[in-house]
Amino acid sequence: MSCRFFIPPSEATLAPGRLPMPEATARHAKVLRLAAGQAVTVFDGTGGEWAGELLDDRWLQLREHLPIEREAHARVMLAMGMPANERMDALVEKAVELGVTAIQPLITRRSVLRLQGERAQRRVAHWQGVAIAACEQCGRNRVPVIAQVATLPDWLERQSRDHSVTQRCLLSPAATAPLQPFASGESGWVVSGPEGGLDEEETAMLLRHGFHAVSLGPRVLRADTAPLAALMRAAG
């Protein structure tokens, strides 16, 4: 069985031949106790993957580029009030496995987790690492971006200048229209609230910015369940 490693373009250029392993990759291989001759797959997030093998504890041999993609048919992005404790880690991991394109952590009025400054940057870096590990595990060759933590108004201000998005959905327990699958090739955001949900003013703000309220059904889902259920439905 081939082990998968992510090596970003900033650390190495992937090409046929011998490749010195970046320090993080070498540590990963050591933790996995890989031996010389072990088949490996390497990707850098720009598309496709490389087949090769481990030469020793410092070098890889890359042999062939394979134009393989395992992305969802639609580009579904999640903007969500961050759940507290360690639930955000699991949410990021599962969302990546299910095909999310990008994740925007939000601070809303009822958010329990309110990250700011250096602490927020450290958590985002940690979540980006979780996303990379999930890609290595599930076979994706493009790593979703975990954006810097933002307040809902600041994020909406940036969204008003983005005309590439064709779908803007807001998960709401009061909505009657069901969330529909995005069309193949379509790009869109799904917004969900924190544990206490979004308040009336935040909901109104989203509606003014072109979002439409949609439902996932009659049951009330947790803050770390609803985004994943929406992702599965929207991505088809």
Image (cartoon, helix red, strand yellow):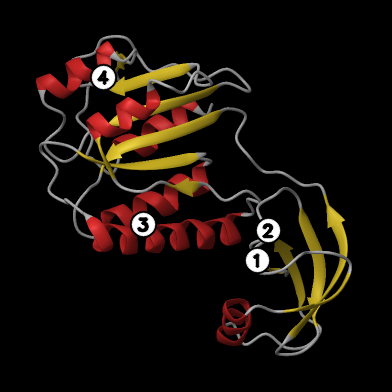
- Label 1: which residue? 7
At label 1, the amino acid type is Ile
Marks 3 and 2, the one that precedes in the sequence: 2
Residue 23, position in %: x, y?
60, 82
- Give me the C-alpha separation between circle 3 and circle 2: 20 Å
**How many other residues sit within 10 Å of disc 3, few (<14), some (14-19) or many (≥20)?**
many
Residue at the spot of label 4: 206
Q: Quadrant of the N terminus?
A: bottom right
Q: Nearer the viewer, residue 232 or 100?
A: 100
* Nearest to N terminus: mark 4 or mark 1: 1
Q: Is residue 68 above or below residue 118?
A: above
Label 4 close to label 1 by CB (< 8 Å)? no
- Label 3 near label 4: C-beta < 8 Å? no
Residue 174 image label? none
155 to 97, vertically: above or below? above
Residue at 31%, 26% (x, y): give it: 156
Q: Residue at x 82, y 70 (%)?
A: 52
Query: Relative to the observer, which residue lies in front, 130 or 230?
Result: 130
